């Protein structure tokens, strides 16, 4: 039986704000049409649009929601699979709208780290498009259940879902700078864009004392780098925790304690290979629940 809604179509969400996603969509659409795959599509043009459209599509009965975009758009659409818009206690885990709905990855972003983690390496857009078509035709039987990161911000009672990683300190600063890049920087490879953003973020480096709880363990340290990761890759190929798995039921919590600016720069040059973990001041803890206070 085809894995689509009652009208026989998947719903595809494209991050229209990203040039790479728009280019990727041209290729994806052409292949879908060549293969005579019917579909509905929406180009998300503002923050929150992709999540709202995904949620509406799941509630409308679509069984496959595909994403043409990067890790940010992918997480935004994944959040749309859950009833985050319904009133509930902030600490309660969100409920899925339809357990039978599936999320399809069509990488078209800067880093595409979650897709890389799923494959244990990079794969082309054509490969992912082919897998989507095979699944829609019931030629590929299996879906894969993966973990997600659900977080709440106590200060303003906001909640969020992401598939890849949540960072505090310099990690969040770098992510914000990458998102704000424009002009020729947007045309650079993802790892280069993240490197440029990292160098500028270092100028604002300042350690903060934080208290971190991972399940039943609590510790404190002076840091400006905390990463809660769900996969081996994040931030344009950075391997915060090389052993992280997307489906092991655990979050990897990476902290770099008591490092100065020079030491941070040194570790950032090694983070794409996981070499930063050789530094005894960098640690990884694993657990199901994480609490961070500053």
Image (spheres, grey):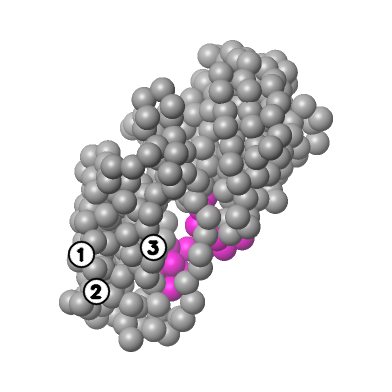
Q: Percent from the top left, x then y, of residue 273?
A: 70, 44
Q: CA distance from mark 2 to mark 3?
A: 13 Å
Q: Find out whether residue 115 is within the magenta segment.
A: yes
Q: Is residue 162 visible?
A: no
Q: Is residue 272 left or right of residue 60?
A: right
Magenta stretch bounds? 113-131
96 versus 44 height, above or below: below
Q: Give the label on residue 5, or none.
A: 2
Residue at label 1? 60
Q: Would residue 26 be found to the left or right of residue 232 on screen?
A: left
Instruction: Tell me the residue at 34%/56% (across/down).
Output: 81
Q: Earlier in the sequence, mark 1 or mark 3?
A: 1
In terms of secondary structure, where does tag 2 sit? loop
Q: Which residue is more in the foreground, 65 or 32? A: 65
Q: Main secondary structure of the magenta part?
A: helix
Could you tell me if the residues under marks 1 and 2 are in contact, i.e. CB atoms within 8 Å?
yes
Is 160 placed left or right of 31 in the picture? Answer: right
Residue at the spot x=37%, y=70% of the render? 100
């Amino acid at each position: 039986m085809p894995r689509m809604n009652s009208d026989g179509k998947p719903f595809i969400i494209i991050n229209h704000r990203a040039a790479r996603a728009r280019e990727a969509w041209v290729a994806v659409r052409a292949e879908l049409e060549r293969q005579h795959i019917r579909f509905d599509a929406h180009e998300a043009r503002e923050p929150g649009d992709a999540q709202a459209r995904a949620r509406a599509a799941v509630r409308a009965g679509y069984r496959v929601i595909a994403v043409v975009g990067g890790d940010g758009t992918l997480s935004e659409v994944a959040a749309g699979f859950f009833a985050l818009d319904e009133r509930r206690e902030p600490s309660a885990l969100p409920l899925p709208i339809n357990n039978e709905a599936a999320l399809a990855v069509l990488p078209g972003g800067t880093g595409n780290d979650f897709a890389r983690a799923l494959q244990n390496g990079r794969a082309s857009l054509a490969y992912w498009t082919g897998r989507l078509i095979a699944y829609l035709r019931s030629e590929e039987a299996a879906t894969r259940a993966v973990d997600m990161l659900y977080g709440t911000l106590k200060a303003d009672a906001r909640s969020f879902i992401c598939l890849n990683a949540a960072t505090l300190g310099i990690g969040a600063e770098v992510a914000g700078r990458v998102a704000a890049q424009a002009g020729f920087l947007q045309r650079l490879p993802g790892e280069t864009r993240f490197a440029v953003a990292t160098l500028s973020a270092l100028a604002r480096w300042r350690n903060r004392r934080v208290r971190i709880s991972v399940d039943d363990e609590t510790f404190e340290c002076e840091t400006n780098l905390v990463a809660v990761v769900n996969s081996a890759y994040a931030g344009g190929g950075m391997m915060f925790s090389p052993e992280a798995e997307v489906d092991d039921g655990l979050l990897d919590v990476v902290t770099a304690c008591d490092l100065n600016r020079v030491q941070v720069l040194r570790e950032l040059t090694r983070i794409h290979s996981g070499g930063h973990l050789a530094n005894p001041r960098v640690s990884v803890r694993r657990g199901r629940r994480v609490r961070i206070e500053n």
